[in-house]
Image (cartoon, rainbow, N blue to C red):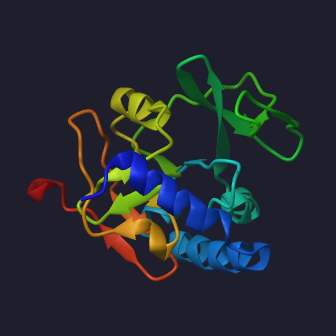
Amino acid sequence: MQTKSELRKMILEQRRQLPEEEVYALSAQICNKVKELQEYKEAKDICLYMPANNEVDLTLLIEDAWNSGKNVWLPKTSGRRMDFFKFDSATPLSEGPYKILEPVSDVMLDPDENTLILMPGVAFSMEGGRIGYGKGYYDIYLEQHYMSKKIAVGYDFQIVDELPIEEHDIKPDFIISEKITGKINKDNV
């Protein structure tokens, strides 16, 4: 098995090479699959992220979420901490510490079981493994807010057969790519 570092480097390079029109087309397919999930339909609060480096573009969900009466939240980082802040049509965005757009908002989410968090990542396995970018922001956040529903989103090539899973890794409830909608069976992992 490849190391996390080798796998991260290989998949990020593959993602970097995706043409813009393919990123948009695949993102639209993935967002449509998210909208079909009961967990999305029932959620009151939807936590998205602003895409960077050819990540799945979840901004395609924003209008649908607002039109469905949902609150949209985006992450902001500060030091080793990440929290989600309210985002609506009047909320400006500014570049954060990683050159990713973050909401200029002071309204912070207090997540609960009606919260759906869509997680980015580099690589995923159907056993619930996830390799992020190495900073642990989502693992730390989700450890404190475990009651929220979690969906990992990525392109099909980001889903691999096997990933090393560490004790602190938080498993998503679902993994969605353009071809796969998979529920993670946490009893067997």
Nearest the camera: 137 or 64? 137
* Picture layout, residue 153 above or below residue 33: above
Q: Name the image quarter holding residue 38.
A: bottom left
Give left or right: position of 7 versus 27.
left
Numbered-mark total: 0
Give left or right: position of 8 versus 64.
left
Give the x, y percent position of residue 39.
43, 61
> Which residue is outermost to the top?
79
Taking the spot 67% from the left edge, 76% from the top edge, the residue there is 28
* Picture layout, residue 1 above or below residue 99: below
Determine if residue 151 is in view.
no
Taking the spot 34% from the left edge, 39% from the top edge, the residue there is 147
Give left or right: position of 128 versus 42.
left
Determine if residue 182 is in view.
yes
> Which residue is outermost to the left?
188
Give the x, y percent position of residue 151.
44, 57
Give left or right: position of 57 versus 148.
right
Taking the spot 57% from the left edge, 73% from the top edge, the residue there is 30
Taking the spot 24% from the left edge, 59% from the top edge, the residue there is 1
Nearest the camera: 78 or 74? 78
Give the x, y percent position of residue 22.
70, 79
Give the x, y percent position of residue 16.
66, 63
**In which quadrant of the rendered image does the C terminus lie?**
bottom left
